Image (tube, rainbow, N blue to C red):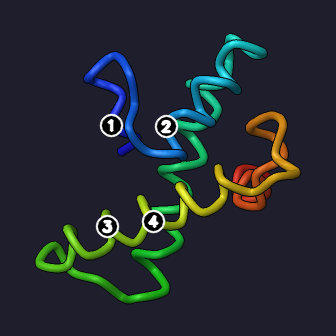
Amino acid sequence: MLNLQSGKPSSLGGIRFLELLEKDEMAFDNLYCVAFQMMDAQWLAKRASYMEFNDVLKSTRAQLERELKLEDVSCVRDLPAYNLLHR
């Protein structure tokens, strides 16, 4: 989702994630959990079927990138969607 396979991400979200990963070795694990909770929440909100999977994935990616770009995010726990893990 963050275009990390190239070794050097081209998106601001990917760059910000690598910065978070330098500070916290659990950043990947936590972001993985957050991303799936985001996708689940969007899936349910849209009442999606498997035919809408790509649309839900695309909107999840956009939300994840928006949240990673927020200036006050210094760790994954600062993401607004992190609260989804504690429902």
Q: In this rendering, which labeled residue sits more in front, label 2 or label 4? A: 2
Q: Quadrant of residue 70?
A: bottom right
**Residue at the spot of label 1:** 3
Q: Earlier in the sequence, mark 3 or mark 2?
A: 2
Check the image and name the residue furthest to the left. 51
Amino acid of disc 3: Lys
Give me the residue at 69% from left, 13% from top: 22
User: According to the image, label 3 marks what residue?
Assistant: 58
| Residue lying farthest to the bottom in this orientation | 46
Categorize mark 4 by other alpha carbons within 10 Å: few (<14), some (14-19), many (20+): some
Q: Are marks 2 and 4 in contact (CB under 8 Å)?
A: no
Q: Which mark is residue 14?
A: 2
Can you say whether 45 is above or below 53 in the image? below
Work out how far the residue at label 3 is from the one at label 2, CA to CA, in angstroms. Answer: 15 Å
State yes or no: discs 4 and 3 in contact (Cβ < 8 Å). Answer: yes
| x and y percentages locating residue 11 in the rendered image | 43, 45
The label number, if any, that marks residue 62 in the structure image: 4
Q: Amino acid at mark 1?
A: Asn
Q: State yes or no: discs 2 and 1 in contact (Cβ < 8 Å).
A: yes
| SS under mark 3 | helix
